[in-house]
């Protein structure tokens, strides 16, 4: 079935009140739902009531307290129809269903994770609990009673505020929760289990006291401290920056070890993948700390952007996700280093969203069609969705943007809104027409700007020719012209920006060229000397640029641009170009000499104390193999990409060896602190360690760091270098064995061990991954293990996964089908790793096509996996 945005119809009935009772038992949980229905005005009396279900088994059905006659309803696992509801405007339906949480391996609806009961309802999991209008525009006030064994489930949680609890005898107890805020079913949650809790409290700006709790596995309470700190900082930040306060008496977070995604913003009861809660220096890396901070903030920020104001239908997913990602990006930028954060965001966007936008899975930020909504929790909806919100701010200016957002929240609080509502609020607040801009929501594909610049000394003009194009994407062959905000600078010899006396050819404001037409010829007057052109500063729009730039201009910008993102970008462009030149040479069996100016610039960046260490670490990091492959575009040979990249790395390492050794010695971060500045020092040092290992061709440095490291960041970095650069070497094998031995009982750390091996380059990786699938710490039913091993292999190991005999693809396909038997959502997500198969060289292309065809020809395929595989093949 294909769902279309234009088919939206409001429901015939509303559900103002929902009362749920859960009698929890691991294998036979009884759910009693008392649903108060109200016929919508204008709907004819007696109109059949059609409710969603998914694998449900109905035990009992009552209407206003009396059993419903068999002729009065039709029930199947996926639907309940009340054929002739009462003519009265209101009635109460009591639905009793029986569930088996222990056997629910999909991790949607009510399931068991490590002995705890938990739920995941977004997007369509509530229908696995009871029959309901499982759609985001039906808002209801929930009261929830939970009954369970006190011994195994002393903690009973749901949304809203606690009302009552007590004993039931025979080892059973209960708790009642009430959430006064009407909400859609996807925000519902219950959790029951035996936890340790880290407690704290927060006083909101208006003086409301909020009890905070983070529930974790016994013995892991100390590892929740950083998440709690991040939560409190998020609460302060949302008050200060957006004027948004928390609205309940309690805010709880539960960490579970089996979770399909990162986390979930259920009202007052966020449920998290434990990977994004648990951290201490001994077991988590700096990247883990940064993710925890961002995701805790993200879920908290959803309380307003998502929960108080929710989505009319799932086509509007970006309304809450794009906006909330934008908010968490801004939060992290304020808590950490803004330019470093921006570079990290762009790297993620390019690595995750660009291939989506440029391949068979491309879709608009607000899609118009879907078969499986669970497959639309994508980088396009989330990351590009955030970029679009950022561009609204760029286009309107910070002040009008703030007014627009405030208006949006005032207008739609308590409602289920649309992207049109969102845009209208900004139009009304700014009195600007955003209709052309809105194409960013509606049109898929990454726009390209082709730019050429010419300087005329005679009349002191600098002319920049800009031409926009948007490549065709599936089912959108013809594209309309977009409004692209292009931030720029004309950089003079002294590194300062030159201010033109006059500009013609486009609207140019506050350093931004507003590209709206196919072609603009922008003329800057009063420019006597040819400047270096700095474009897309701060990454003002999610696009690609085609511009022939002189290498000496790029080196100049890398050294001097006032915009740090642009400095990083200039260097990154040079490194990418150099690698591609080497790739062409490698493919032609030739050697390539790298530009000594570029090599020297890398050394200069490394030692430039005016730059923060985290920035220097990013500057020294080469574009990834997939970044390079994406730039090459077609007929890719991943082995040649790998060799080209290694060659450049080696040239940089050898030419700067002495310097890098000195810097590695100086930049000890000292005692562990998780803050951004300390993390930056570790990042720089670990990039340097990689170069030192490369130039010396000895595992000595890495082995020494592995032995002496007192935090997981340094330890995992050293282990990665040993495993990747010296595979099979006794130091590498010893370190891997040692690590395994130390962390056997810590699944989140074992994930790192799986990741490091799954990403070890080379033809042997297939065999390594195959044998790790049988490792006792691996579990095909746990999404984190699957992603650590198979997800890492398929997305980060270009030489292993794309082995030219196709064996990597076959191992991958077998695993995807194995995962699918339990968890179709995770399998479908995993399968997207094959989306760029058409850009490979012919032999690999054919091997990849064969496994895709093999998967798609399975008759018992889940609709989740079928949707992805068929789109990838189309
Ligand atoms: N709303 C959640 C978040 O972005 C994502 C939940 C999606 N879950 C799923 N099974 N598709 O924070
Ligand atoms: Zn979200």
Image (tube, rainbow, N blue to C red):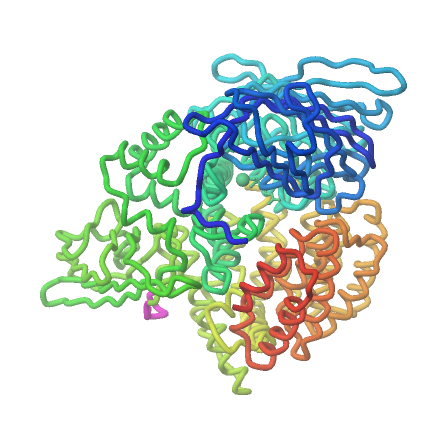
Please name the residue shown 34% across and 42% down the image.
392
Q: Quadrant of residue 426?
A: top left
Of residue 642 and residue 377, the one placed in the foreground of this image is 377
Q: Position of residue 542 (x, y in %)?
A: 39, 54
Q: How many marks?
A: 0
Q: Using residue 323 as the reference point, say whether residue 264 is left or right of it.
A: right
Q: Quadrant of residue 658?
A: bottom right
Is 636 colored magenta in this rendering? no
Q: Is residue 515 above or below residue 44?
A: below
- Which residue ends up furthest to the right in the rendered image? 170
Q: Using residue 440 as the reference point, say whether residue 182 is left or right of it.
A: right
Q: Position of residue 97 (x, y in %)?
A: 73, 32
Please name the residue shown 43% across and 56% down the image.
568
Of residue 834 and residue 241, the one placed in the foreground of this image is 834
Q: Is residue 427 visible?
A: yes
Q: Is residue 229 above or below residue 493?
A: above
Please name the residue shown 50% across and 64% down the image.
360
């Amino acid at each position: 079935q294909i769902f279309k945005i234009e088919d939206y119809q409001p429901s015939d009935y509303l559900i103002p009140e929902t009362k749920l009772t859960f009698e929890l038992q691991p294998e036979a949980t009884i759910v009693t739902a008392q649903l108060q229905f109200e016929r919508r005005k204008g709907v004819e009396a007696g109109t059949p009531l059609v409710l969603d279900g998914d694998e449900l088994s109905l035990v009992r059905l009552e209407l206003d307290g009396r059993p419903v006659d068999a002729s009065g309803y039709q029930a199947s696992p996926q639907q309940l129809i009340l054929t002739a509801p009462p003519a009265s405007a209101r009635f109460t339906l009591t639905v009793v269903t029986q569930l088996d949480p222990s056997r629910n391996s999909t991790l949607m609806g009510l399931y068991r994770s490590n002995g705890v009961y938990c739920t995941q309802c977004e997007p369509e999991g509530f229908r696995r609990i009871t029959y309901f209008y499982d759609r985001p525009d039906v808002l209801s006030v929930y009261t929830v009673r939970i009954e369970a064994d006190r011994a195994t489930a002393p903690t009973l949680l749901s949304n809203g505020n606690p009302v009552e609890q007590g004993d039931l005898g025979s080892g059973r107890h209960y708790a009642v929760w009430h959430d006064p805020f009407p909400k859609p079913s996807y925000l519902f949650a219950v959790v029951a289990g035996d936890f340790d809790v880290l407690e704290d409290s927060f006083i909101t700006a208006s003086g409301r006291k909020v009890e905070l709790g983070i529930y974790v596995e016994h013995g892991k309470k100390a590892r929740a401290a950083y998440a709690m700190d991040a939560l409190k900082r998020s609460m302060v930040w949302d008050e200060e920056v957006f004027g948004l306060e928390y609205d309940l008496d309690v805010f709880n977070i539960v960490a579970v070890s089996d979770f399909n995604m990162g986390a979930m913003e259920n009202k007052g009861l966020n449920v998290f993948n434990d990977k994004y809660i648990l951290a201490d220096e001994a077991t988590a890396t700096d990247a883990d700390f940064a993710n925890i901070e961002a995701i805790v903030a993200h879920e908290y920020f959803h309380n307003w952007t998502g929960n108080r104001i929710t989505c009319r239908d799932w086509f509007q997913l970006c309304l809450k996700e794009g906006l909330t990602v934008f908010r968490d990006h801004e939060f992290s930028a304020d808590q950490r280093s803004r330019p470093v954060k921006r570079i990290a965001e762009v790297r993620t966007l390019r690595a995750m969203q660009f291939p989506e936008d440029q391949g068979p899975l491309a879709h608009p930020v607000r899609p118009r069609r879907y078969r499986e909504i669970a497959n639309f929790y994508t980088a396009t909806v989330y990351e590009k969705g955030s970029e679009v919100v950022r561009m609204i701010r760029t286009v309107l200016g910070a002040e009008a943007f703030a007014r627009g957002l405030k208006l949006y929240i005032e207008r739609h609080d308590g409602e289920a809104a649309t992207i049109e509502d969102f845009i209208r609020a900004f139009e009304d607040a700014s009195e600007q027409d955003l209709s052309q801009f809105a194409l960013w929501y509606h049109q898929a594909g990454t726009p390209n700007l082709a730019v050429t610049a010419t300087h005329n000394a005679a009349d002191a003009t600098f002319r920049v020719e800009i031409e926009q194009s948007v490549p065709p994407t599936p089912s959108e062959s013809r594209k309309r012209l977009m409004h692209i905000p292009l931030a720029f600078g004309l950089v003079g010899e002294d590194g300062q920006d030159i201010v033109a006396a006059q500009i013609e050819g486009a609207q140019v404001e506050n350093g931004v060229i507003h590209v709206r037409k196919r072609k603009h010829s922008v003329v800057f007057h009063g420019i006597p000397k040819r400047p270096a052109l700095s474009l897309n500063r701060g990454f003002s729009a999610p696009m690609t640029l085609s511009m022939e730039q002189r290498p000496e201009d790029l080196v100049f910008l890398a050294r001097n641009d006032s915009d740090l993102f642009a400095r990083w970008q200039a260097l990154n462009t040079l490194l990418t170009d150099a690698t591609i030149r080497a790739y062409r040479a490698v493919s032609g069996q030739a050697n390539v000499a790298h530009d000594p100016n570029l090599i020297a610039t890398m050394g200069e960046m490394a030692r430039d104390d005016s730059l923060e260490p985290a920035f220097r670490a990013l500057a020294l990091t080469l574009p990834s193999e997939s970044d390079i492959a994406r730039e090459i575009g077609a007929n890719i040979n991943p082995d040649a990409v790998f060799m080209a990249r290694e060659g450049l790395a080696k040239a940089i390492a050898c030419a700067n060896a002495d310097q890098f050794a000195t810097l590695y010695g100086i930049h000890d971060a000292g005692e562990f602190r998780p803050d951004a500045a300390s993390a930056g020092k570790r990042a720089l040092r670990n990039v340097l360690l990689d170069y030192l290992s490369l130039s010396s061709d000895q595992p000595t440095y890495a082995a020494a760091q592995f032995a002496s490291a007192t935090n997981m960041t340094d330890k995992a970095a050293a282990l990665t270098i040993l495993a990747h650069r010296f595979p099979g070497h006794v130091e590498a094998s010893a370190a891997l064995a040692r690590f395994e031995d130390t962390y056997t009982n810590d699944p989140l750390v074992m994930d790192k061990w799986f990741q490091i091996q799954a990403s070890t380059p080379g033809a042997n990786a297939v065999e390594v991954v195959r044998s790790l699938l049988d490792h006792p710490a691996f579990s095909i039913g746990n999404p984190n293990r699957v992603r650590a091993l198979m997800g890492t292999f398929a997305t980060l190991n270009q030489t292993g996964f794309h082995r030219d005999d196709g064996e990597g693809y076959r191992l991958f396909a077998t695993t995807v089908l194995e995962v699918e038997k339990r968890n179709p959502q995770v399998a479908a997500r995993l399968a997207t790793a094959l989306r760029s198969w058409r850009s490979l060289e012919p032999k690999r292309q054919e091997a990849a096509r064969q496994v895709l065809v093999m998967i798609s020809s399975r008759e018992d395929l889940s609709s989740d996996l079928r949707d992805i595989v068929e789109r990838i093949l189309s």
